[in-house]
Amino acid sequence: MSASSTPESPLIETPERIALRRAVGDLGRRYGSSYFLARARAGEHTDELWSEAGKLGFLGVNLPEEYGGGGAGVYELSIVLEELGTVGCPLLMLVVSPAICGTILARFGTEEQKRAWLPGLADGSRRMAFAITEPEAGSNSHKLSTVAKRDGADWVLNGRKVFISGIDGADAVLVVGRTEDARTGKLKPALFILPRQTPGFEYRPIPMELLSPERQFQVFLDDVRLPADALVGDENAGLQQLFAGLNPERIMTAAFSLGVARQALNTAVDYAKTRTVWDTPIGAHQGLAHPLAQCAIEVELARLMMRKAAHLYDAGDDLAAGEAANMAKYASGEAATRTVDQAVQTLGGNGLTQEYGLAALLAATRVGRVAPVSREMILNYVAQHTLGLPRSY
Ligand SMILES: Cc1cc2nc3c(=O)[nH]c(=O)nc-3n(C[C@H](O)[C@H](O)[C@H](O)COP(=O)(O)OP(=O)(O)OC[C@H]3O[C@@H](n4cnc5c(N)ncnc54)[C@H](O)[C@@H]3O)c2cc1C
C-alpha cells in the first residue's frame, strides 16, 4: 500500500512483494501502536511480536536460505520494517540485527560464525546489537579508538561506545574496533562478536526522550578478552565488512522513517475526514489538505528512492547503491519529520494526546535524521561524491 490507501501496482512491485506487504501488515495490525507504545512506556520489550515475525520468516527474509533465511534481499526486509511501522510497530532492531549484523556475517563470517548466528537471527531466537559510535569520534569514524590487541591466540578489547541500541535484548554485540594505533588517523577496523555476558563488558541505559521499547546504551569495554574466533572473517577485511553493513543500514533507516511517516499520515487523513468544527470536515480546508498532500508526495518520492537503493544493493552494485541509499535515508528522514509535524498539527489538541500516539513520533522522526549518519554528513557525501565539490573537513 502506498501512503494513501491506493494498492501498490504490480508494474512497480512484484506480486510476491505485494503479498509480503499484506502479510506483514496483517501481523503488525494484530499488535498495533497501542501495544507498541504501552510496552515502551512500561520499559518492556516487544518479544512476542519479534518472535512471531521470526517464525513467519519476516526477520530473516534477507538472509541466505542455507542458514535458515528467506533467500530474498534487503528490499524485502525494508518491506517488513516499513509495513510494521505503518501500523504502529517500528522495530528499530530490524535495522541492526538482520540488516547490519546479518548481512556482515552472511557476507564475511566464517562458516562456524554463519552456522552459529544466522539461523537464530533469522527465526528471531537470537539477536545481535551493533556498536560503532564512540563518544569522542561521533560522525568521524576515522577517530574510533576502541582498540583490539592480540594476546596469544586471544583478543583483548578496550574502549567506549555510545547510543548502542537494544543491548539488553541482544545475545551479542557486533563491536567495531581497530587493530592499529588509534592515532594513525587511518581507519583499519576489525569486527568482533562479543557475547553479552563477557567479563569486562558493561552497558548502562542512556535516559532518552524517545518512546521506544528499544533503548540506547553506553558501553564500557575494559580488558574484554575474546577468543580468536570472535573476530569476524579475515582481519584484513574489516573495512569491506563495515561497508557491507552501511547500505542495508541506510536503506532500513529509510524504511523506519517511512513507516512512521505513513502511520502519521494515515492517522491525520482519517481524522481530517471526520472532524468537523465549521460546516465541512477540517480536511476540506486547503490550509490542512495541501500540506497533507505535499507530505503524501514527499513520502512517495522517498519510497521510490528507497526501492532504487534496495534494488541496486540486492543486484550487487554496492557503489551505486551507496549514493542511492544515502539519498533515500536523507529524503525519508526529511519526509517523515515534515509529515509527523503536519499530522500533529492536523489533530489539534489530539495531536498531543496519548490516545492518538502521534506526539511520540515527533522524537522518533528525529532518529531518522541523526542516525546512523546525520543529514549533514549525507549532504557532505552528495556534495563531494555526486557533485564533485571540495571537502570542508
Ligand atoms: C536513537 C539512536 C539509536 C542509535 N543506535 C546506534 C546503534 O545501535 N549503534 C551505533 O553504533 N550507533 C547508534 N547511534 C548513534 C548514531 O549513529 C550517532 O548519533 C550519529 O552517527 C551521529 O553521531 P553523534 O551523535 O556523535 O553526533 P556528532 O558527530 O557529534 O554530530 C553533531 C552534529 O554535528 C554535525 N556535523 C558533524 N560533522 C559535520 C561536518 N563535517 N559537516 C557538517 N556537520 C557536521 C552532525 O551532522 C550533527 O548535526 C544511535 C543514535 C540514536 C539517536
Image: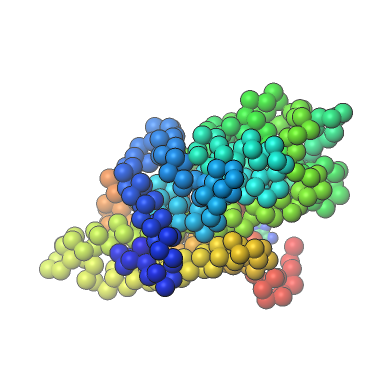
Question: What residue do we see at 84% from left, 30% from top?
Answer: 153
**In the picture, which quadrant includes the C terminus?**
bottom right
Question: In the image, what residue occupies the spot 70% across and 44% down?
Answer: 109
**Of residues 71 and 318, the one drawn nearer to the viewer in this rendering:** 71
Q: Where is residue 220 in the image (x, y as percent from the top left)?
A: 68, 32
Vertical position of residue 69 compared to residue 197: above or below: below
Q: Is residue 369 left or right of residue 276?
A: right
Q: Which residue lies furthest to the front in this view?
A: 66
Q: In the displayed structure, does residue 10 sit left or right of residue 176?
A: left
Tell me if residue 30 comes above or below residue 384 in the rendering.
above
Please give the name of the residue rendered at 39% of the width and 51% of the height, measured from the top-left corner: 24
Q: Which residue is found at the position 33% from the left and 66% from the top?
A: 7
Q: Is residue 252 visible?
A: no
- For this orientation, the residue located farthest to the left is 279
Asked if residue 36 shows in the view, the reply is yes
Where in the figure is residue 378, as x and y percent of width and height?
62, 63
